[in-house]
């Protein structure tokens, strides 16, 4: 049986303003699918003989990841929390150590997947995994190479060698992202595959190779995993010990050094959607080459990607553009310049702004809030609390809060009193009052919160009790 390991770390900025540091690409719905990229990765495993996926993600994304796994029917999946990013070799080592803990004498097969890749031909993907299983059972470290259909300078390549079985080859070497002329020679030779960053190998076999080639990484990961704590389905790795681990990719640490690397070729409609132009490449387009999403009017417009999330966007007489609208930021870029989005995000960060961190809507383990309006000494939020969920028992030093229930029923603790507030009713929480909010019903609780006071930052909170481990 295969153990899927899904790497959902990273806070990439290449798809800003849709992707934010606290809500990155892997948790977004980028295509016509109703699923996020993470959920699509999980759904891709349907019909295969696999265990519950094991997820690796950043500490700050834990509740978003857990909620999306719950929606996918995998609420019991283990989620390993990385206290800091250390690239793919340590992340995979953490997962391997976790799997080996209960494996006994067996060597569990790890199917390592990235949470933010697009694969349109699921059957071809699953067939490729099935071809890789016998090789992995023989102690091989299998990587999956994508058959290229055009010269591509944005991917690393795998040079395949002797054919071992149908679509399975020994690896002659890994090469860095080439220039265009080199990429053309790779395509013409038919011997090179795009490096997908997906793998299948035994957990113990991987750890043995890591011990051979990068014992410093393995030692640091073992120490960090020896000092873990469990909270709900989260496995928290020791921050102090994991911070000592070198940062290295699995390619550099193991795959380029091992004598046991093999590659399975895939033609499965794969893309890592690494830029807005890459998303335009894989999107459905109209007769003018436009990919339009949301409330969009395109007049005399061609070869353009337009995404409108919260309002009407009209494009007139433009070509080869990317136009992305969210409720707090708009991006307009030529498709040839979308790699420079990272420079804009860096400027936003350096200017002390917040648009790189999160959207107006912020996800919490109990639900979501949307910052509707703000000004000097006030802020207005629309809050949604899931059925059965409860915010922490808390207190604020600098702000008072008015709650107006729009739908559902709220159970409010306000100092020594606990009472129900229903639709069209309101309540007031004074400054310094210990309070909590709970949804005891079976439908979402929707309310408007009006904050007023001298300081309205999210860090003005003292938690006394919290069922989500945030105390």
Image: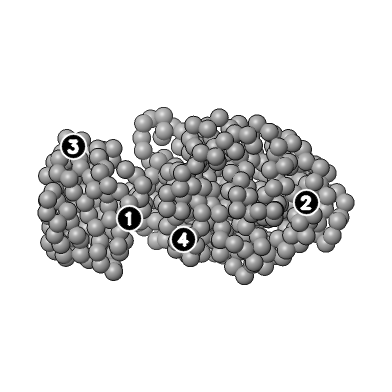
- Label located before the other in sequence (4 or 2): 4
Q: Which residue is mark 3?
A: 397
Q: Please state which of the two labelled residues, at mark 2 or mark 1, is closer to the viewer.
A: 2
* Residue 375 in sight in this render: no
Q: Nearer the viewer, residue 140 or 30?
A: 140
Q: Which residue is mark 1?
A: 366
Quadrant in which the N terminus is drawn: bottom right
Q: CA distance from mark 2 to mark 1?
A: 44 Å
Mark 1: secondary structure: loop
The image's mark for residue 75 is 4
Residue 425 on image: x %, y %: 12, 61
Mark 4: secondary structure: loop
208 on left or right of 243: right
Q: CA distance from mark 2 to mark 3?
A: 59 Å
Mark 3: secondary structure: loop
256 on left or right of 37: right
Contact between labelled residues 1 and 3, with CB atoms less than 8 Å apart? no
Q: Residue at x 41, y 34 (%)?
A: 348
In this view, the residue farthest toward the front is 104
Residue 235 on image: x %, y %: 49, 47
Q: Nearer the viewer, residue 146 or 347?
A: 146
146 on left or right of 231: right
Q: Residue at x 46, y 44 (%)?
A: 229
| On screen, residue 179 above or below 468 | above
Contact between labelled residues 2 and 4, with CB atoms less than 8 Å apart? no
The image's mark for residue 139 is 2
Q: CA distance from mark 1 to mark 4?
A: 15 Å
- Label located before the other in sequence (3 or 1): 1
Contact between labelled residues 4 and 1, with CB atoms less than 8 Å apart? no
Q: Nearer the viewer, residue 83 or 148?
A: 83
Q: Quadrant of residue 331?
A: top left
């Amino acid at each position: 049986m295969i153990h899927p390991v899904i790497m959902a770390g990273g806070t990439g900025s290449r798809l800003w303003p849709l992707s934010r540091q606290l809500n990155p690409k892997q948790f977004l719905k980028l295509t016509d699918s109703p699923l996020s990229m993470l959920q699509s990765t999980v759904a891709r495993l349907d019909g295969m003989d696999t265990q519950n996926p094991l997820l690796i993600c950043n500490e700050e994304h834990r509740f978003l990841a857990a909620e999306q796994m719950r929606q996918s029917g995998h609420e019991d999946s283990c989620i390993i929390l990385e206290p800091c990013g250390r690239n793919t070799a340590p992340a995979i080592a953490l997962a391997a150590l976790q799997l080996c803990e209960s494996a006994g004498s067996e060597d569990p097969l790890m199917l390592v997947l990235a949470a933010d890749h697009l694969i349109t031909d699921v059957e071809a993907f699953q067939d490729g995994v099935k071809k890789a299983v016998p090789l992995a059972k023989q102690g091989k470290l299998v990587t999956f190479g994508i058959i290229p259909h055009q010269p591509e300078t944005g991917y690393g390549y795998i040079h395949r060698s002797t054919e071992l079985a149908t679509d399975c080859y020994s690896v002659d070497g890994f090469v860095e992202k080439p220039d265009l002329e080199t990429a053309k020679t790779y395509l013409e030779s038919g011997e090179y595959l795009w490096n997908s960053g997906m793998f299948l190998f035994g957990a113990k076999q991987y750890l043995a190779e890591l011990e051979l080639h990068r014992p410093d990484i393995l030692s640091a990961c073992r120490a960090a995993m020896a000092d873990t704590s469990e909270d709900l389905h989260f496995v928290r790795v020791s921050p102090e010990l994991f911070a000592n681990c070198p940062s290295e990719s699995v390619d550099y640490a193991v795959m380029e050094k091992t004598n046991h690397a093999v590659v399975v070729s895939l033609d499965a409609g794969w893309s890592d959607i690494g830029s807005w132009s890459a998303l335009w490449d894989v999107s459905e387009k109209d007769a003018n080459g436009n990919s339009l999403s949301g409330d969009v009017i395109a007049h005399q417009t061609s070869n353009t990607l337009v995404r409108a999330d919260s309002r009407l966007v009209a494009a007139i007489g433009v070509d080869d553009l990317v136009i992305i609208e969210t409720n707090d930021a708009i991006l307009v870029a030529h498709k040839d310049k979308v790699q420079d989005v990272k420079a804009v995000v860096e400027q936003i960060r350096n200017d002390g702004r917040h648009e790189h961190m999160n959207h107006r809507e912020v996800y919490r383990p109990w639900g979501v809030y949307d910052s509707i309006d703000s000004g000097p000494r006030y802020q207005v939020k629309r809050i949604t609390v899931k059925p059965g969920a409860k915010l922490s028992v808390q207190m604020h030093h600098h702000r008072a809060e008015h709650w107006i229930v729009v739908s559902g029923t709220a159970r409010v603790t306000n100092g020594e009193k606990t009472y129900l507030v229903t639709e069209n009713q309101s309540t007031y929480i004074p400054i310094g009052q210990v309070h909590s909010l709970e949804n005891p019903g079976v439908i979402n609780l929707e309310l408007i919160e009006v904050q007023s006071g001298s300081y309205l930052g999210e860090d003005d909170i003292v938690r006394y009790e919290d069922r989500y481990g945030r105390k």
